[in-house]
Amino acid sequence: MSRWLRRSLNRKLSFFLLVSILVPLLSLGYFSYTTASKLTEEKAKQSGMGSLRQIDTNLQFIVKDIENMSLFLIGSKDVQQYLSNQGDNVVKQTLMIEFLSNLVYSKPYISDITINPKYQSHPVSNSTILESGLTDITAQDPDYFTTHPRWWTSLYENRTISGVKRVISLVRPIRNMFTFEQIGMLVMSLDEKSVKRILKQASLESDDYTMLVDSQGRILSSGAADPMNGSIQDFLPGLPPFTEPSGSFNYEDPSSSKKTILYLTMPDVNWTLVRVIPYAEFRSQNRYVLALTAVSVGIAGLLIASLVVFFVKQVTRPLLMLTHFLKDTNPEEPIEPYPVETMDEIGQLVRSYNKLGGRIERLTEQVKHNESMKKEADMLALQAQINPHFLYNTLSSIHWMALMNQDTKTAHMVGNLSDFLRFSLNKGAQYCSVSQEISHARHYANIQAIRYPDKFEIHFFVDPSMNDIMMLKLLLQPLIENALIHGILKKDGKGVIHVHAVMNKETMTFVVDDTGVGMEPDKLREVLYRLQQSDEPEPIVQGSYGLRNVHQRLLLHYGSEAGLKIESMEGIGTRVTFTLPAMEESQA
């Protein structure tokens, strides 16, 4: 991966731009999905709670209707007269059955109405009940109806001639309107099938279901596909109690899947509507949201990727063209300028490249010029060493001494001259050891000492550790010559020349000073000025190698910090100094 990125700026920019854009985009998609999922769940809860309220309204209507009908029956004149009579009266019993049947006929949710007389042996009902599962609440609590005007039973079964019916009954005592003596008991049974139909209306198209439970947690009816009898804890174990009139919470049992529980309490009868919504229903709705989010993010990602690739290519196209241009450039040929097409950072880069190309060309020309000057300076140094005038004077002196004195000085002078010429030529080599350079300077001084007897003295002070270190040759002799001719010989009396060579860690310092006539400040400034003029056609001092030639050779071979430094005071003398790097091996 890293190698793939390193090979192309286009790929690198595209990769990082895509990462920097797609990561926030995917994060936004995930946030949108989670938010939509929560909204879907909340919407489902609101819809479920709305269904519970609709069921509550329907059940409240039925309950109120049954309670109102029970009050009508209790206060009915016919019912009061029938229950007040003692003994069985078949005719009145038949009329009472017809009266109850007419009431039930208009109320399909009522299974039956039964009146149990206190003073008669047979109860009266609109239908024939062979066996009833109704329990007597007064058997458990004799004073129940003293504190409660009515009692809604739990779910039980009645076996009739038309089959078994599951019912929930309203039980009320019937009292005499005048004496308030209890004369009977009224039982109005609500058909559980009617309740079940109402509960199913809220969950016809989903896997959720609604239950109706009483205050004891017993299931009165359920809209589930399978029958649900008994306690709600049997189907939802560990279900917490309902502490508020309505609400919702998430329920999860280790043996079943996660569910959302909605509940709504019917305070008049102390029943509770409980709706159970499996989380699978939310997931089925969330899958659509997830698919929609994925498609949206995918389309946006493809569009962004296309735009990123397009714009990156537009940005990097000038760089690619410049790269191809540089690949096709011949290093041996002059660098051609690249056309500037824009004013942005890439255009600035192209302009900098063009400036760099021009600078390289100028530096190349300067290097070539310096090399030619270096060769010219070395040639001038060689020519100066074999100057015909110098050779003429030397040979004349040898000839004179040979004729007049006939002594050993002649041989000595000839020997020094021979060594001097041999070192100057040196087979064209540019470098020599410090000891060889000092020996060359001594040969020159010996020759001049014979030529100008009792005119000067020369002393050499050389650090022995420098003897084998290499340096550019023919540097000290021109400085000694300059000190002798332009300093010592122009002054009356005998002068002294000192040559110092000092080692300073990685550099060598050479000093040539004399006790000659020195220079005036104006003359010194003129010499220093002309010393810096590399294109001066004439040497500073006619008839000698000259300071400028040495100075230029030092600059060409050792750099700008290796030039001559000149100090002079009129009537006291002149000091010339230069510093070289210590080279362990010979240079070409």
Image (spheres, rainbow, N blue to C red):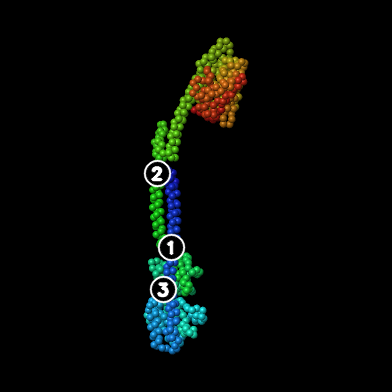
Specify whether residue 441 is in view: no
Q: Nearer the viewer, residue 89 or 541?
A: 89
- Write the residue at 41% across / 73% down: 195
Circles 2 and 1, Cβ within 8 Å, touching? The answer is no
Residue 313 has which mark? Answer: 2
Residue 289 location in percent, x, y? 41, 59
Residue at which label 3 appears: 195
Quarter of the image where one finds residue 361? top left
Question: Crowding near pointer 1: few (<14 within 10 Å), some, many (20+)?
Answer: few
Q: Amino acid under label 3? A: Val
Q: Nearer the viewer, residue 223 or 77?
A: 77
- Write the residue at 61% across / 15% down: 492
Q: Amino acid under label 1? A: Lys
Residue 287 location in percent, x, y? 40, 60
Left or right relative to 482: residue 163:
left
- Rounded to the nearest angstrom, the CA distance separating label 2 from label 1 is 47 Å
Residue at which label 1 appears: 43
Of pointers 1 and 3, the one earlier in the residue sequence: 1
Of pointers 2 and 1, the one earlier in the residue sequence: 1
- Write the residue at 40% across / 55% down: 294
Circle nearer the viewer, 2 or 1? 1
Circle nearer the viewer, 3 or 2? 3
- Rounded to the nearest angstrom, the CA distance separating label 1 from label 3 is 26 Å
Q: Amino acid under label 2? A: Lys
